[in-house]
Amino acid sequence: MKLNKQLLVALCLLLPTVLFAQNKCELPRSITCIDHDPLFVKRVLGKVGLNQKRTRSKSEHEFRPLGDACVSIYTVEGEKLVSSARSKKNGKFIFRKIPDGTYWLVARDDVGFLTPARIRIKVGNNMVDGKIKINLVPKEIDSCSWADLEVKILID
């Protein structure tokens, strides 16, 4: 009985810490892989998911949407947080009213099993109106996460 009380007290003390930690969406301390070529976008929206094949294949069956992933935008200069959001169950995210400029788009899981993605984006009205597809891969030696831009071409 005494052990159950101690366990209950420990859970009550740890639960707020765990819940608070899950709501935080901040810049990971170290990201070893960076996509250096920027994606040129009109709007910052897209989806984040797990890529199990770890290749830049366009095949959708290798991409599993990741819900509740932390997606954040930081300034390139000084790495100040501009905005952050959680992906929906289907992996989709959207940021509204991001001023024109160059930013870091960072995506990660809370548990830390996946390699965070750090993608340079350039936002502007004269840029491509596409969706960003962020591919997170499991942490391993020499594994990097990345992003691609999905664009639908309309022919008149």
Image: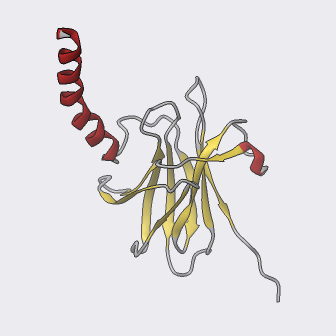
Q: Which colour scheme is used?
A: secondary structure
Q: Where is residue 7 in the image (x, y as percent from the top left)?
A: 23, 17
Q: Where is residue 19 in the image (x, y as percent from the top left)?
A: 29, 40
Viewer-proximal residue among 36 and 137: 137
Q: Which residue is drawn at 50% across and 57% down?
A: 88
Q: Where is residue 43 in the image (x, y as percent from the top left)?
A: 52, 72
**View extreme (front): residue:** 1
Residue 54 as seen in the image, left or right of residue 28: right
**View extreme (top): residue:** 2
Q: Quadrant of residue 77?
A: bottom left
Residue 28 as seen in the image, left or right of residue 118: left
Q: Quadrant of residue 145?
A: top right
Q: Quadrant of the C terminus?
A: bottom right
**View extreme (right): residue:** 156
Q: Which residue is drawn at 82% across and 84% down?
A: 155
Q: Quadrant of the N terminus?
A: top left
Label tally: 0
Q: Position of residue 10 (x, y in %)?
A: 20, 22
Q: Residue at x 58, y 55 (%)?
A: 90
Q: Which residue is drawn at 73% across and 72% down?
A: 152
Residue 20 as seen in the image, left or right of residue 64: left
Residue 29 as seen in the image, left or right of residue 104: left
Judge whether 142 appears above or below 33 on screen.
Answer: above
**View extreme (bottom): residue:** 156
